[in-house]
Amino acid sequence: RRWHCIIGRLLEPLPRAVDAEQLCTITNIMSSNNTIVSFATGLVSRLAATIPTLSSSTNNDGDNKTTSSSELLTQLLNDISTPQSLQDLFVLTTIVVIALEILNQLVYHVPTLLQNLLTNDEKKKAIPVRGKHLDNFTMKDYTFIMINKCMTGLFVYCYFGYLWSVRKLEEDDSHGDCCNKHGGQGIFTTTNLSIHNTILPLPLLFIIYDFFYTLLHWFLHMKSVYAHVHKHHHFQKAPSRANIDAVNVHPLEFFLGEFNHILALVLVVQGVGTVSVGGYITVGYRGMDVSWVCAVLFIGLGG
């Protein structure tokens, strides 16, 4: 009874307990959050399970045999073509498109809001338009925009799917030898995050990406190609719709530009070697670990 009195005095300054209706609302919110987390976890887990990993087996002669690229591709197509996997990929694409729409609104409205708050001079609020603005979209514009937005979901799956396929496993203790022979690995655990696999790969990723994108852009400006692919991009000379104008390009150009991120990621992780002695690369770049945080920063900062 004495302890009851002490606890009562301690709790007396606190607000009264919530009523039944408020408690029911809080419970529903918590239940909804748990449902969303469970749904997202299941979606990611099922998609991750469709991604084949590089593995090696020992044949009858005692030699290690690594799974070939054709076998990996066949396994990937078989796993991703199931009804459940296609449904998960559709949901992922929908989430990515919604996220892009939110980002588009932020990019479009936030700078204008900040500009209005920082200056009262009407002349400084409007950025002068240089070039003819594409005021009205045609059906071709809307079609290209829709196709490219949907393609972004596939890109996200392939981009992080590759990094997941070469991920570092917790039980893998021979990572140092693996790096020397077969390149780096994808890092997904927080305990293995470091400056070496999160910050250092970024400059190399941007350099490789820009190198191949420069070659691609040069190729798209060739007379025999320009009119069929890249010319559509140059119809808009004064972009003003943020992400909408950014993705209003020919689907082939969008595909090559986006999946160029994956090419840069593959080269940074796997490396480029020209001479190998005893299984170890002695000339060239042998690859490095890249964390999922680094991969997010790469496409987040680079677009």
Image (cartoon, helix red, strand yellow):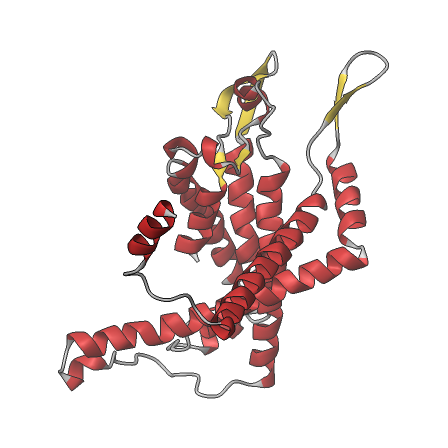
Residue under the image location 53 percent in, 57 percent down: 257
- Residue 182: x and y in percent read 59, 25
The quadrant of the image that shows the C terminus is bottom left
Residue under the image location 60 percent in, 70 percent down: 228
Q: Quadrant of residue 18?
A: bottom left
Residue 234, above or below 132: above
**Residue 28 appears in the figure:** yes
Residue under the image location 48 percent in, 52 percent down: 213
- From the viewer's perspective, is 258 left or right of 125? right
Q: Quadrant of residue 266?
A: top right
Residue 253, above or below 2: below
- Residue 77: x and y in percent read 77, 49
- Residue 283: x and y in percent read 49, 20
Residue 166, above or below 30: above
- From the viewer's perspective, is 61 left or right of 289? right
**Residue 253 appears in the figure:** no
Find the residue positioned furthest to the front: 1
From the viewer's side, name the closer residue of 298 and 29: 29
- From the viewer's perspective, is 218 left or right of 156? left
